[in-house]
Image: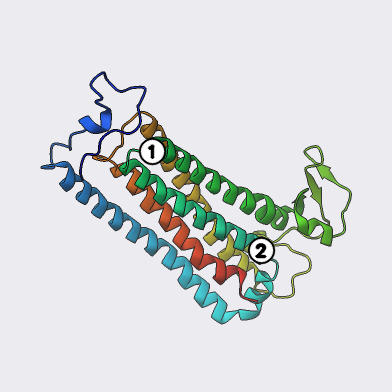
Amino acid sequence: MTTVPIRETESHATATGAVPWHKYKAAHHFRNKEEEFDGVKLGMWLFLATEVLLFSGLFCAYAVFRILHPEAFTNGSSYLDWRWGGLNTVVLLVSSYTMAASIRNVQLQQFARAKFNLLFTMACGLAFLCIKFLFEYTPKWSGWFFVLDPALSHHEDSGKRALGGLFHFVEGYGGKRPGEWFDYPFSTDNYEHLWWSVYYSATGIHATHVIIGMGLIAWVYLRVRKGMYGPTHYTGVEMAGLYWHLVDLIWIFLFPLLYLIH
């Protein structure tokens, strides 16, 4: 890592131009910052490998249940709208780009751009969660549709409203829950509850990772604002980026497996 002349003035900079990232020293058990960076990155890759093992178990369960009950999976997948899944895929792909761009911005001391890209990445994560919970989980679980959901026009409105008209209830649509909570009245397959168990487990764990990733990015954003990261020290930014790319990669596998069966 090389030092680059400062291009942006930080409010916390000293009269000599020194900022926290410039003064950063490696932990005592490392010989230098380069060795610390390599060690931390190796540790992060090992952690990501355990995350892959976690989702591999879900993929194995998906494969076994789909082979045993293909009709249940095809029928269950038919209730998913591939357009929402596709939109969420685009949202995460864009967020991966802005996350990678923020790392490059920090390396080039483009701190204003770095902060914008970090905020934009978090906004993409929030958009992903809103689509998942408002337009997918809520109606399937309870029968309540968000008023802006285009699918609402394809169902007969019961007239029930909630939260000032933000949610409309469709009689008989809810109940698509996992396992023993499954009580969808128009199910045509006795094993459809297995499909919903896999669906909620995979997408729920993934959504949890999105929330954790947003928390990491928020932490990095605050440290960038304080001048903790720069061309000679950006370890935290890159590790958060690696985690976020894993979140994106897992969804690229989940999207076709769950949404494109039919």
Residue closer to the observer: 142 or 20: 20
Quarter of the N terminus within the rendering: top left
Above-or-below relation of 45 to 108: below
| Residue 219 in sight from this viewpoint | no
- x%, y% of residue 158? 88, 53
* Quarter of the rendering occupied by the C terminus: bottom right
Q: Amino acid at mark 2?
A: Arg
Residue located beneath label 1 in the image: 220
| Residue 83 numbered mark, or none | 2
Q: Judge from the rendering whether residue 116 lies leftward or rightward of residue 4; answer left or right.
A: right
Which residue is depicted at the point 51% across and 54% down?
Answer: 94
User: Which residue lies most toward the top here?
Assistant: 15
Question: Residue 125 placed where, x, y %?
Answer: 53, 48
Q: Residues within 10 Å of mark 2 (few under 14, many from 20)?
A: few
Residue 10 in view in this figure: yes
Residue at the spot x=78%, y=65% of the render?
Answer: 185
The residue lying toward the viewer, choosing from 172 and 40, is 40
| Mark identifier at residue 262 | none
